[in-house]
């Protein structure tokens, strides 16, 4: 299945979701990976669902820093289909 | 040496998952995690790998995220066959076969039904077919709507002030588009949150600049010679000039493909037992089949076993995972009892809910106040807490979720520093909607 969101030959992006039921807007992820996680208003967490693989370290930092473990990441370099 | 457990486990054979979205993906992963080593096939009528829908009415409309960027992370290696872009059209339980739209069949040993729901369309097909009339469910819908918003339509008319209608209205205002939001109810979201909270949502949308018309219905949509929508005629005789209409009248469960299968499935969903196995029309569970997510209707143990069908993201994840374990032979003795929960964000405000408000006979503002714009409302029925809803006050919710699970008495004991005398109000739910 070609993925239409990718230019040919590009490294596939990471895949991120946040369980926003769980998220308590503590904003640790926003400090760990600024730009990829941003709080809009008091509690609305906005996140980039497809950060480029070069942001791997920052995203991983965000994932482990979340006090309620709401962040899930798929790293295509580390996983099969 | 094989343990009892391993013998009960289903580690081989062919498992078919129909519906390749949130519940189907999380179900397939849970199946693998539980040790299922057989063949796994995911069937989805959309051409896309599973993707996330919540951004589609929020950041994907405002342009912060591209609609095609919300592909869901795969959290466990699946080693699956993907049959994407092909719908399941029938189920033969005697032959244990799923029929597909391309004429092929898939035989299964175990089947997960996760076909979710779709947007209810405008009831008049000619009017629904006018150019400029949209619904929003999938990422292609979001892309089309985003494109239609770009040139700056004269006015966006949103029909239906449920969660998706309200979120789309707020997103359109963030893009500075003129918006009219119409609903027959007394206030937006009143059917779910009750009238007092609905009034707060109404004030929020008015402050965003939405032209909100409650207690009003659209009688018909009119097009020009080119077949483009140009106006809506309301039942009260008023006219709204519009060139972009979003029909947000709720969802319809995708169960048509199950007709003739002998399963108890229809507009109310696929009827399941407590464990999550699908029931046949005689009420007998088919232990080869489970259902999960938007499409499933099941008796909820936290709410007196009342049959419910929940259209929430967290529910699709939790019930999908439960169904995966069930089909792998791991969850046979356990009933699915996840506390219902959802969130919505509109106009920078985050609304979160735990429990179910349906059937509430009373409510209190338990923390904060509408004036501050941050508060928690707790809903009660027959003297017990059944739901809590927060506006920008999510940190209170886990404690209320515990009280609801424990069937704590209503009004709740709030504690905390801002405890005040609680005034018990009536939620004043409007009548059930019978037509748009
Ligand atoms: C715009 C939008 C915003 C939302 N926002 C929120 C939110 O903020 N918070 C929240 O809690 N929830 C939200 N939701 C709800 C949440 O996304 C759903 O509850 C969730 O997607 C349900 O997942 P599911 O897998 O059960 O069903 P679905 O996501 O509906 O997936 C079912 C899949 O099965 C496919 N299918 C259907 N019939 C067939 C067939 N016969 N053969 C093969 N495939 C078939 C469908 O095309 C679809 O891909 C939102 C939903 C939408 C549409
Ligand atoms: S760190 Fe976790 S809880 Fe905090 S904002 Fe990020 S996702 Fe939410």
Image: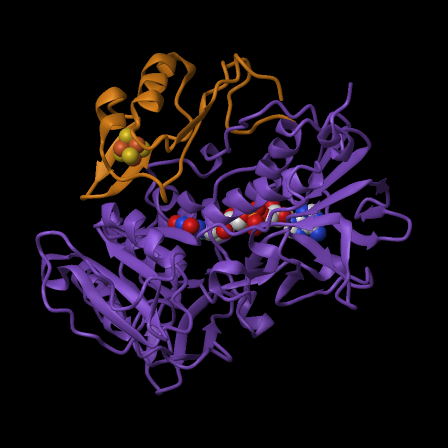
Chain colours: A orange, B purple
Q: Quadrant of residue B106?
A: top right
Q: Quadrant of residue B22?
A: top right
Residue at x 38% of width, y 78% of height: B184
- In percent of width and height, residue B346 lies at 28, 53
Q: Is residue B214 above or below residue A78?
A: below
Residue at x 27% of width, y 49% of height: B175
Asked if residue B262 lies left or right of residue B65, the reply is: right
Residue B141 visible to an observer of this rendering = no
Q: Quadrant of residue A8?
A: top right
Residue at x 37% of width, y 33% of height: A70
- In percent of width and height, residue B281 lies at 77, 67
- In percent of width and height, residue B380 lies at 32, 70
Residue nearest the viewer, comparing B137 with A80? A80
Q: Is residue B45 above or below residue B66?
A: below
- Locate the N terminus of chain A and report the quarter of the image it occupies: top right
- In percent of width and height, residue B236 lies at 35, 87
- Locate the C terminus of chain A and report the quarter of the image it occupies: top right
Q: Quadrant of ligand 2?
A: top left
């Amino acid at each position: 299945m070609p993925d239409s969101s990718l230019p040919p030959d590009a490294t596939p992006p990471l895949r991120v979701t946040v369980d926003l039921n769980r998220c308590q807007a503590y904003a640790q992820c926003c400090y760990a990976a600024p730009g990829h996680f941003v709080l809009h208003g008091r509690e609305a967490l906005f996140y980039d669902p497809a950060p480029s693989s070069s942001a791997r370290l920052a995203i991983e930092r965000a994932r482990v820093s979340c006090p309620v473990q709401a962040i899930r990441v798929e790293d295509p370099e580390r996983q099969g289909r | 040496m094989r343990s009892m457990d391993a013998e009960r486990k289903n580690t081989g054979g062919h498992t078919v998952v129909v519906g390749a979205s949130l519940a189907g993906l999380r179900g397939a992963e849970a199946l693998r995690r539980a040790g299922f080593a057989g063949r796994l096939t995911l069937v989805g009528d959309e051409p896309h790998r599973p993707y996330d829908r919540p951004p589609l009415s929020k950041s994907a409309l405002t342009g912060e995220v591209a609609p095609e960027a919300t592909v869901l992370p795969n959290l466990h290696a699946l080693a699956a066959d993907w049959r994407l872009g092909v719908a399941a059209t029938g189920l033969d339980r005697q032959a244990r076969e799923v029929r597909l739209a391309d004429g092929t069949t898939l035989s299964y040993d175990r089947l997960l039904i996760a076909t979710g729901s779709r947007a209810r369309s405008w009831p008049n097909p000619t009017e629904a077919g006018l150019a400029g009339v949209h619904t929003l469910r999938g990422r292609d819908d979001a892309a089309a709507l985003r494109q239609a918003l770009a040139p700056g339509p004269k006015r966006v008319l949103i029909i239906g002030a449920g969660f998706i209608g309200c979120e789309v209205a707020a997103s359109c205002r963030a893009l500075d588009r003129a918006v009219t939001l119409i609903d027959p109810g007394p206030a937006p979201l009143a059917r779910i949150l009750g009238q007092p909270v609905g009034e707060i949502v109404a004030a929020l949308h008015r402050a965003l600049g939405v032209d909100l018309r409650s207690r009003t219905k659209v009688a018909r949509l009119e097009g020009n010679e080119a077949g483009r929508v140009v106006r809506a005629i309301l039942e009260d005789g008023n006219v709204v000039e519009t060139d972009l209409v979003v029909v947000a009248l709720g969802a319809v469960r995708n169960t048509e493909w199950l007709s003739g299968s002998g399963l108890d499935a229809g507009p109310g969903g696929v009827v399941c037992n407590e464990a999550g196995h699908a029931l046949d029309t005689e009420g007998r569970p088919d232990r080869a089949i489970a259902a999960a997510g938007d499409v499933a209707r099941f008796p909820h143990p936290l709410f007196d076993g009342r049959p419910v069908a929940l259209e929430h993201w967290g529910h699709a994840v939790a019930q999908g995972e439960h169904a995966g374990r069930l089909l792998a032979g791991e969850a046979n003795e356990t009933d699915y009892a996840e506390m219902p929960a959802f969130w919505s964000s509109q106009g920078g405000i985050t609304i979160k809910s735990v429990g179910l408000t349906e059937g509430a006979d009373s409510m209190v503002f338990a923390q904060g106040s509408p004036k501050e714009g941050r508060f928690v409302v707790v809903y009660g029925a027959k003297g017990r807490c059944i739901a809590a809803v927060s506006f920008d006050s999510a940190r209170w919710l886990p404690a209320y979720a515990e009280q609801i699970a424990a069937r704590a008495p209503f009004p709740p004991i709030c504690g905390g520093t801002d405890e005040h005398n609680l005034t018990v109000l009536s939620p004043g739910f409007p009548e059930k909607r019978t037509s748009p």
